[in-house]
């Protein structure tokens, strides 16, 4: 009898271990999620909690809707929106996964917030829902499987879809600047008179916006007149906002080198003074490294390069009449936000 029990134990052991392993694996299942602020697809663990644990972090109504597939009463709960001029992301109330952008919200008159697309197909899961005698498509959070709402094919173009979501399944995260959303980066160059520098950079594909101003001096809020005294230490610069997915920092550096003389100290052609010095102001260590490498590649230049590579300081925009100066004079093509 003992021997039989012994054999039985070894027969069952692998089954027990297998079940245990499967359980562990499902707890750590990795999925890909798009993160709006980093603009990257990231590997994350799926989230599993017991009902008791969900109840600890959700209100009773959030729990009823997201975990028990409930539907909130329409028009009852006001959907939060970001303050004017700001942007926002609606995240899953259960796991903070980015779900919808405020920009993709539209008024559907249904009493539930409606969106025409999610931030990414990766972040939601659509499953058939045949309850209540209807054939519908249910939307779940891809990470924590929270019930969010349903998707219908009567939305506006371009998708034609209406993602109809329960307010209580969402939490709004304000995005202070469009830069965070657009994945915009900033470069600042001093390449002589800023009128000409701006006219060059604003024509580059991938450059979203340019502003002329001053950087690198000691006086706060300098005017053009202050800078022209040659005593403030400021440089005339062009601040370039660009999309690094279209134009790289290295490409912008090539434009910088090609469009001024980096070998003349405090001078560009007829313009003379410290405000005309050749400078690259970097915002990140990556930019600094790229700038130094780019400069090193020009070592065979006919004369030594005097361009400074320094950390960016405060940027002071120049007076309005200096902005897009050549464009205003009808001299150069325009530069517009894409
Ligand atoms: Zn979730």
Image (cartoon, rainbow, N blue to C red):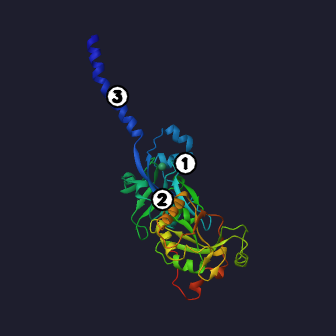
Q: In which quarter of the image is the N terminus?
A: top left
* Label 1 crowd bin: few (<14), some (14–19), many (20+), radius 10 Å: some
Q: How far apart are marks 1 and 3 (CA)?
A: 39 Å
Report x, y in % for residue 327.
56, 85
Q: Which mark is residue 39?
A: 2
For discs 2 and 1, the disc positioned in front in the rendered view:
2
Residue picked out by circle 3: 17
Residue at 47 percent across and 45 percent down: it is: 67
Q: How far apart are marks 2 and 1 (CA)?
A: 32 Å
Report x, y in % for residue 165.
48, 57
Q: What element carries label 2?
A: loop
For discs 2 and 3, the disc positioned in front in the rendered view:
2
Residue at 40 percent across and 62 percent down: it is: 152
When asked about the image quadrant of residue 6, the answer is top left
Instruction: Name which of mark 2 and mark 1 comes first in the sequence.
Output: 2
* Label 3 crowd bin: few (<14), some (14–19), many (20+), radius 10 Å: few
Q: Which of 156 and 283 is in front in this view?
A: 283
The response on whether ligand 1 sits within 8 Å of label 3 is: no
């Amino acid at each position: 009898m003992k021997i039989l029990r012994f054999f039985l134990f070894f027969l069952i052991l692998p089954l027990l271990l297998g079940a245990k392993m499967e359980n562990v694996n499902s707890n750590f299942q990795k999925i890909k999620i798009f993160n709006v602020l980093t603009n990257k697809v990231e590997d994350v663990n799926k989230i599993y909690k017991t009902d008791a644990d969900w109840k600890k972090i959700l209100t009773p109504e959030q729990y009823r809707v997201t975990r028990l597939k409930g539907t909130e009463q329409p028009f009852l709960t006001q959907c939060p929106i970001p303050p004017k001029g700001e942007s926002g992301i609606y995240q899953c109330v259960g796991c903070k996964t980015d779900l919808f952008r405020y920009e993709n919200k539209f008024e559907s008159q249904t009493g539930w917030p409606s969106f025409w697309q999610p931030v990414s197909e990766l972040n939601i899961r659509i499953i058939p829902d045949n309850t209540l005698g209807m054939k519908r498509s249910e939307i779940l959070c891809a990470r924590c499987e929270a019930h969010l709402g349903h998707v219908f094919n009567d939305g506006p173009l371009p998708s034609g879809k209406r993602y109809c979501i329960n307010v209580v399944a969402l939490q709004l995260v304000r995005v202070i600047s469009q830069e965070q959303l657009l994945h915009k980066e900033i470069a600042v160059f001093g390449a002589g008179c800023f009128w000409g520098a701006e006219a060059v950079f604003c024509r580059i594909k991938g450059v979203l916006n340019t502003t002329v101003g001053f950087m690198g001096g000691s006086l706060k809020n300098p005017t053009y007149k202050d800078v022209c005294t040659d005593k403030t230490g400021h440089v005339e610069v062009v601040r370039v906002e660009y999309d690094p997915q279209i134009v790289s920092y290295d490409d912008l550096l090539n434009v910088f080198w090609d469009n001024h003389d980096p070998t003349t100290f405090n001078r560009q052609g007829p313009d003379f003074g410290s405000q005309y010095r050749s400078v690259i102001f970097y915002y990140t260590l990556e930019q600094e490294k790229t700038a130094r490498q780019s400069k090193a590649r020009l070592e065979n230049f006919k004369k030594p390069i005097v361009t400074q590579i320094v950390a960016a300081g405060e940027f002071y925009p120049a007076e309005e009449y200096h902005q897009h100066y050549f464009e205003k004079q009808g001299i150069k093509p325009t530069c517009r936000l894409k």
